[in-house]
Amino acid sequence: MKQTRPARRTAASVIGSAALSLALAGGLLVPAAQPASAAPTLRVQRVVGGLTIPWDVTWIGQTMLYNERPGRVWTKRPGAAPQRVNLALPRIWARSEGGLLGLVADPGAASNGYFYSCMSVAASATRPKDVEVWKWKLTSPTTATRVRTMVSGLPIGSGRHNGCRMVIRGNDLFIGTGDAAQGANPQSLGSLGGKILRVRLDGSIPTDNPFYRRGGNARYVWTYGHRNVQGLALRPYWGSLYSVEHGPDRDDEINRVAPGANYGWSPTPGYNESRPMTDLTRFPRAKRAAWRSGAPTLATSGATFLSGSAWGSWNGRLAVALLKGQGVQLFTVSTTADVATKREKVLTSYGRIRSVHQGPDGALHFTTSNGSNDGIYRVAAG
C-alpha cells in the first residue's frame, strides 16, 4: 500500500526545477545527487549498570527517565549519578512477563514534567488485577505525582503477553497491548487485549477512533488482531506508525499500522498457537505483515527509526531490539509498499536487548534484559 506524504510543501519543492533535485530515501528528503554514504562507526558506552531488567527509557528535557521491571523508576542528568524517584505506584505484578513496563514522556515534558507509564497491577500478593496506563508529573529529580489513570482494565491473565509499548504522535498516545494468552481477545472489540489503542494526552477518547460508535472498550481501539505488541515506532517526516510484535514459535512481525485494520491473529478455539500470525484463511482482509521472521523467531522487541546525517547509510533505517536474537536488527522500510527488509545486525555483544530509543542528543540508547547486572547503553555514530 502506497504511503501518502503529509500535506505540506517543503522549501525545496517550491524551488521546483532550480538547482536542487530531491529524492526520497528512507522517508526523508535528501539531495538526489549525493554519493552513497558509508555505514557509521559506532562508539558504545554504558550509561547505567547494575539494573534488573530496565524495560524502558525516555527523556524529560535532558533528564533521562528509566525504570526497572520489578517496580523502580530513576532519573539521571548528564554527568550526574542516578536518583531514585519516589512515586505512589500501585502494587506491581512483577511475575511472568508482567511488571513496570512502558514509559514515554509527554511532548511538552521539558516544561510540564508529564510522562506516562504502562504496568501490570496486582490485586494482592498472589493475584493479578489488570494492566493500566497512568499519567504522572515529575516535580523534582526524586519525586513524581500521579495525574490520572489513562486506561485500565487491560487483560492480564497469568502475566503472559502484557504488551505495554507506547508512543506519542501529536496529541495522541498509542498503546500496544498483549492478548494475555487468551484466545478470544485479539478479535474481540470488547477486549482491550491484542490491540493498539489510541487516547488523547488528557485521557479523553478521540471520537474519530475507528470503532468509537460501538461504545464500551471498542471506543479505544485503533487496530486489532495482535498477539503481543512489543515495539511502536514513528517514521520521521512521514509520521507513519509501525508496530513490532512477538510471534509464537515463528513469525515475529513488523507491521505498518493502519486505523481500523485487523492483523489476523486469532488462536481459537482455546489458545492454539499453531494458528498463523496473520490468518488470511479466516480473515481474508487481514493486513499482511511488512516483515515476518519465519522460523525460528528472534523475539523482536522495542523499535525506533534512526534519524540524522551522523548515521550515514543507516539514516532512516528501523532499528529493532532482539531478545532471543541478542542484538539490534536494522531494516530498510519501503516508502511505496508495506515492506521491510532485513539489513545489518549490530550490537551483538550485550545479550538480550529490550528497548531502543534515539535520545535528544541523536545517539541511540538501548536497555539490556539479561536478568542481572543489566544496563542502559549509549551508541554514538560518526
Image (spheres, rainbow, N blue to C red):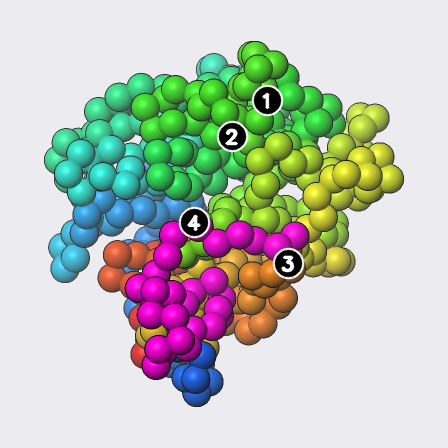
- Judging depth in this view, the residue of 143 and 288 nearest the camera is 288
Task: Name the amino acid, label 4.
Answer: Ala
Residue 244, horizontal then vertical, whole percent: 57, 49
Helix, strand or loop at label 4? It is loop
Q: Is residue 4 magenta?
A: yes
**Circle nearer the viewer, 1 or 4:** 4
**Circle nearer the viewer, 2 or 3:** 3
- Judging depth in this view, the residue of 367 and 345 nearest the camera is 345
Q: Marks 4 and 1: in contact by CB < 8 Å?
A: no
N-terminal label among 1 and 4:
4
N-terminal label among 4 and 2:
4
N-terminal label among 2 and 3:
2
| Distance from the alpha carbon under mark 4 to that under mark 2 | 25 Å
Q: Is residue 263 magenta?
A: no
Q: Marks 3 and 2: in contact by CB < 8 Å?
A: no
The numbered disc on residue 197 is 2
- Mark 3 Cα shell of 10 Å, populated few (<14), some (14-19), many (≥20): few
Residues rendered magenta in the picture: 1-29
- Mark 4 Cα shell of 10 Å, populated few (<14), some (14-19), many (≥20): few
**Circle nearer the viewer, 4 or 2:** 4
Residue furthest top as drawn: 215
The numbered disc on residue 7 is 4
Magenta stretch prevailing secondary structure = loop
| Distance from the alpha carbon under mark 1 to that under mark 4 | 25 Å
Q: Residue at x 14, y 59 (%)?
A: 79
Residue 44, horizontal then vertical, whole percent: 34, 71
Residue furthest front as drawn: 17
For disc 1, the marked residue is 211
| Distance from the alpha carbon under mark 2 to that under mark 1 | 11 Å
Q: Marks 3 and 1: in contact by CB < 8 Å?
A: no
